[in-house]
Image: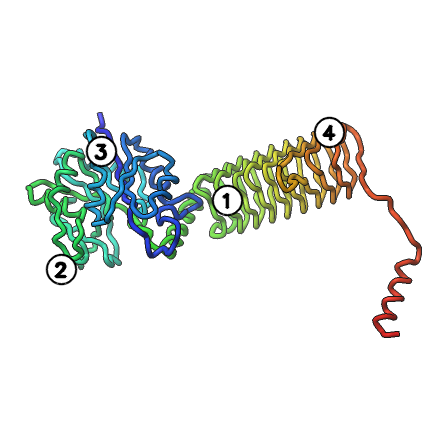
């Protein structure tokens, strides 16, 4: 039987390099705050407790978590060891394994976390497991000085390292796994006797080693433990995530004709044999069924696209859009809270907002649903096989019946019964020769005659 797991996530830093009014860990990657990427991996372990250490802009993190984790405040902020100590009250009575994570290190997988926990319970009974990585550019990372195998001989922060220790390329990610009964006992012994005058979390490793206990490392890929501290690093993380997601999409049976130009959200779902042409952006909440063609330069968010549909080019599908099987949305068409039935189509230059379009209906070019009166939104209902002529304005709330026809250029403000024709146009007035006389008069005026 596995021990219960608690996760302590550090997110108290000010994130000054972001230069933002938004907390650093709430900046999005693929449309999702980086903290919530991490929390999703944590949740895959079914933890008994989650504690997020907060400080600056704590109210923003509290709102983003929406009660899904306990909060502990670090004030003042005296280092990583001091930060973890703030979780002690929230974990009172907890007897299990503690994962120490960082809100600005969002890509650590649940598999890696599980690997750390498993190593903690290996036969050699280590006191602390540290997640480490090798890099050719160690910069200012803390160093993990190795012993035999995966054993750790010493850990040291960059500021306190000797030149020989800085030459080591095995770096500390900051992530650890440790039993709760060991963690807080060790933390009480940590001091600020170092160059930064902070309480370092890494010192629990050195203290445990001094007690004659074993501490070990688990290796991770450098990209998995990349920290995000600036706008540039955020862009790098987005680029890495998108590259991984594009590769996965193609491996799962979608065709991306120019992969580097397609942008996914964290929850985008693509079926088999989906074609995605260049410059397509998926916002959150998009599900695409099998055999869909998404033409170039489309922006899609919050939409469900059925089997065999075709979208674009230059289409925008907004939240609440649902396309039935083989429906078609063409160039320069925008939809919002619009449900199109099987085989319905709007091929050109159309806005469908707060609308239901029946199966087989045809929406002509230039049609708009006038859904807003300045105060409230209203729905338009279009029946099966209805035909809406080009340049029509459907003034909601209005219902167009099954098989009805709305003549081109109509402004329809009353319901149209099934099978009826509705034509709403002003009477045409013809004045023979008027235009010729007008042009002649204006040319003479312009010539000064």
Sequence-first disc among 4 and 3: 3
The vertical placement of 109 against 440, above or below, is above
Q: Are marks 3 and 1 in contact (CB under 8 Å)?
A: no
- The residue at the point 58 percent across, 46 percent down is 295
Give the residue number, with chain letter if any, for mark 3.
91
Give the residue number, with chain letter if any, for mark 2.
162
- The residue at the point 30 percent across, 32 percent down is 45
Tell me if mark 4 has few (under 14), some (14-19) or many (20+) residues whose alpha carbon lies within 10 angstroms of its own.
many
**Residue 343 in the image, given as x and y percentages of width and height:** 65, 34
Distance from label 4 to label 2 (Cα)?
A: 81 Å
Distance from label 1 to label 2 (Cα)?
A: 48 Å
Give the residue number, with chain letter if any, for mark 4.
401
Distance from label 3 to label 1 (Cα)?
A: 40 Å
Viewer-nearest residue: 351 or 412: 412
Indicate the secondary structure of the residue bearing disc 4. loop
Sequence-first disc among 1 and 2: 2
Indicate the secondary structure of the residue bearing disc 3. loop
């Amino acid at each position: 039987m596995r021990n219960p797991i608690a996760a302590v996530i550090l997110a108290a830093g000010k994130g000054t390099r972001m230069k933002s009014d938004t907390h650093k860990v709430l900046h999005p990657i693929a449309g999702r705050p980086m903290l919530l990427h991490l929390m999703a991996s944590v949740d895959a372990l079914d933890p008994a407790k989650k504690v997020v250490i907060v400080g600056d802009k704590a109210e923003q993190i509290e709102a983003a978590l929406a009660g899904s984790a306990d909060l502990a405040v670090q004030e003042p902020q005296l280092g990583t060891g001091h930060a973890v100590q703030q979780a002690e009250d929230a974990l009172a009575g907890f007897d299990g394994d503690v994962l120490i994570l960082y809100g600005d290190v969002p890509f650590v997988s649940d598999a890696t976390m599980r690997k750390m926990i498993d190593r903690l319970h290996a036969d050699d009974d280590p006191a602390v497991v540290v997640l480490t990585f090798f890099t050719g550019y160690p910069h200012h990372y803390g160093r993990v000085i190795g012993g035999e195998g995966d054993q750790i001989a010493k850990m040291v922060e960059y500021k306190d390292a000797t030149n020989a220790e800085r030459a080591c390329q095995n770096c500390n990610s900051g992530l650890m796994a440790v039993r709760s009964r060991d963690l807080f006992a060790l933390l009480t012994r940590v001091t600020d006797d170092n160059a930064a005058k902070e309480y370092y979390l890494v010192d629990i490793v050195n203290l445990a080693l001094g007690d004659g206990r074993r501490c070990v490392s688990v290796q991770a890929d450098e990209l998995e433990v990349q920290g995000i501290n600036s706008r540039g690093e955020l862009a790098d993380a987005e680029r890495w995530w998108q590259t991984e997601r594009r590769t996965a999409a193609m491996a799962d049976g979608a065709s991306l004709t120019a992969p580097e130009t397609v942008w996914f959200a964290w929850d985008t779902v693509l079926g088999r044999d989906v074609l995605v042409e260049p410059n397509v952006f998926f916002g959150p909440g998009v599900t695409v069924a099998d055999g869909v063609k998404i033409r170039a330069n489309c922006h899609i968010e919050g939409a469900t696209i059925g089997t065999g549909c075709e979208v674009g080019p230059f289409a925008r599908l907004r939240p609440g859009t649902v396309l039935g099987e083989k429906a078609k949305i063409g160039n320069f068409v925008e939809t919002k809270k619009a449900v199109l039935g099987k085989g319905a189509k709007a091929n050109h230059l159309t806005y469908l907002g707060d609308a239901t379009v029946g199966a087989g209906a045809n929406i002509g070019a230039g049609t708009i649903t006038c859904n807003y009166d300045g105060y409230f939104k209203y729905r338009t209902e279009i029946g099966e096989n209805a035909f809406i002529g080009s340049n029509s304005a459907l003034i909601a709330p209005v219902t167009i019946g099954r098989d009805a026809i709305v003549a081109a250029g109509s402004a329809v403000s009353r319901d149209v019964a099934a099978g009826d024709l509705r034509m709403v146009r002003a009477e045409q007035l013809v004045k023979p020769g008027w235009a010729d006389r007008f042009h002649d008069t204006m040319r003479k005026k312009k010539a000064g005659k």
